[in-house]
Image: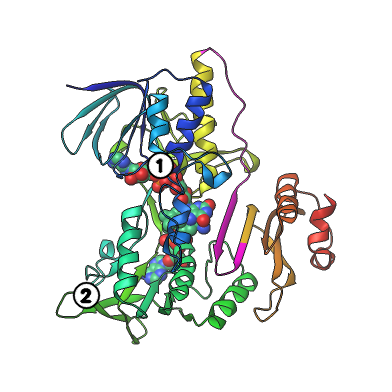
Amino acid sequence: MAKSFKYIILGGGVSAGYAAREFSKQGLKPGELAIISKEAVAPYERPALSKAYLFPESPARLPGFHVCVGSGGERQLPEWYTEKGIELILSTEIVKADITTKSLTSAGGETFNYETLIIATGSTVIRLTDFGVQGADAKNIFYLREIEDADKLYEAIKAKKNGKAVIVGGGYIGLELSAVLKLNNVDVNMVYPEPWCMPRLFTSDIAHFYEGYYANKGVKIIKGTVATGFTANSDGEVKEVKLKDGRVLEADIVVVGVGGRPLTTLFKGQVAEEKGGIKTDSFFKTSIPYVYAVGDVATFPLKLYGELRRVEHVDHSRKSAEQAVKAIKASEDGKTVEEYDYLPYFYSRAFDLSWQFYGDNVGESVLFGDNNPESPKVKFGAYWIKDGKVVGAFLEGGTAEENNAIAKIARVQPPVENLDQLAKEGLSFANKI
Ligand code: FDA
Ligand code: NAD
């Protein structure tokens, strides 16, 4: 027999947790809402997985980081959902979605019907096996997306105590995992094809600092090449990483972070897509009126820049979920809410470092402060300037007030005439706005 709900959230990640909180705030009757997740646990703050979850001492563990603690809210333990009459349907993978019959089918053959659906399936990892890298299915080659992945990696770090790791990829996962493995006293080589790390966001001047800092911590960085194959020992465990440039690196553990892919496949041909995601309006409504999409999967109008974007970061996953639920509830009362007006916000933390970025990293960039990795006190940043206005701002080592100031500047987009002057003024320029 099919189970029916007024609302179903498909996916049990960050967006799902924040959407549930918003539903509860807006008023929800018991039995109206279900969250269906292939994960075995209630929604949690995913960013913890590449940071405190892997610390050698007192690692973070559930229930410590269930949503909504990541943004200073109250923790939603599994009991919270029970109290609110929200059904948490865990360890349940949906394998078929039919928009016309408003139904979802699980791998176990159960059917779930809804009146309104929120797609919150997030992203999955791109695998080296996807492009046929030889030997990439060896044991101890890890990816990191869900808590199960983090558990397996944690066990391997313990089993291969003080071993050797190769990190493939120089993006978010690459930088965060190199750091946390080093903290675990693992010997770390990091390999990526680009001339500097995190090229999606960092300028070469910003990357100069991080590469130097990591090198001082003992992380060995190999740039401009990729992993083309792996060899394994007689137990099938990875032993060596072969690089395109001919080098061969020993490895007990490999962590791959070569990008993510939004999980939209269940809805292919059923909802409009754009820029690799599910196209939505400013209320996260898809091309089908009773289907919404939030978080990593949504391609939404970024009002500030007048274009459609997809954002794969936690702040947007929280805010888009809240916006969608507000819009759903308002439409039931024949009302509307204000359009989503998002200011992109990304951050990362590794070792003792912590940076924040707001806005858009387009146009010319200007570095300010001291990006020397040897400096005892770390504080530097960058502005991006387009059409004579500051459109983006990055800051390493900022205080809460300073981070607020760079957020404000990215929102206000003040004009600048002289870039040399801007570089000299640095943070004081943001503080004035
Ligand atoms: P999310 O991935 O959180 O949740 C999707 C859920 O859907 C999962 O529970 C999944 O199992 C489930 N699901 C998918 N398909 C399903 C199906 N067919 N049936 C049932 N369930 C299904 N961002 C940031 O700004 N700062 C940071 O420091 C970090 N750190 C970070 C670390 C790591 C390790 C990762 C992987 C990601 C980050 N991020 C981040 C990115 C951030 O976590 C991400 O943008 C949000 O989690 C996206 O939230 P969603 O709810 O869209 O997807
Ligand atoms: P990413 O896109 O940040 O970085 C991928 C990196 O891998 C890039 O440097 C890319 O050039 C490199 N690469 C691509 N092909 C390669 C190859 N064959 N060999 C070696 N390197 C290769 O993606 P990610 O780091 O895998 O992160 C996955 C997802 O998780 C993203 O959505 C990201 O936003 C999210 N995430 C975010 C944070 C954060 O915001 N702090 C932290 C962790 C993860």
Mark 1: secondary structure: loop
- Crowding near the residue tagged with mark 1, few <14, some 14–19, many ≥20 C-alpha atoms within 10 Å: many
In-front residue for pair 30/393: 30
Which image quadrant is residue 190 in? bottom left
Q: Is residue 417 left or right of residue 165?
A: right
Q: Position of residue 49 (x, y in %)?
A: 42, 57
In-front residue for pair 50/268: 50
Q: Residue at x 30, y 81 (%)?
A: 242
| Residue at the spot of label 1 | 43
Mark 2: secondary structure: loop
Q: Is residue 125 left or right of residue 175?
A: left
Residue reaching furthest to the bottom: 247
Q: Which is more foreground, mark 1 or mark 2?
A: 1
Q: Is residue 227 left or right of residue 80?
A: left
Q: Position of residue 129 (x, y in %)?
A: 25, 64
What's under tag 2, amino acid-wise?
Glu
Q: Residue at x 51, y 17 (%)?
A: 331
**Can see residue 309?**
no
Q: Position of residue 198 (x, y in %)?
A: 52, 66
Whichever of callouts 1 and 2 sits on the residue coming sooner in the sequence is 1
Residue 271 in the image: above or below residue 67: above
Dividing the image into 4 quarters, which one contains the N terminus?
Answer: top left
Q: Would you say residue 425 sits in the magenta stretch?
A: no
Whether the residue carrying mark 1 lies under 8 Å from ligand 1 is answered with yes
Q: In the image, which residues are magenta?
A: 333-354
| Residue at the spot of label 2 | 237
What's under tag 1, amino acid-wise?
Pro
Residue 68 in the image: above or below residue 211: above
Q: Residue at x 63, y 57 (%)?
A: 356
**Can see residue 62?**
yes
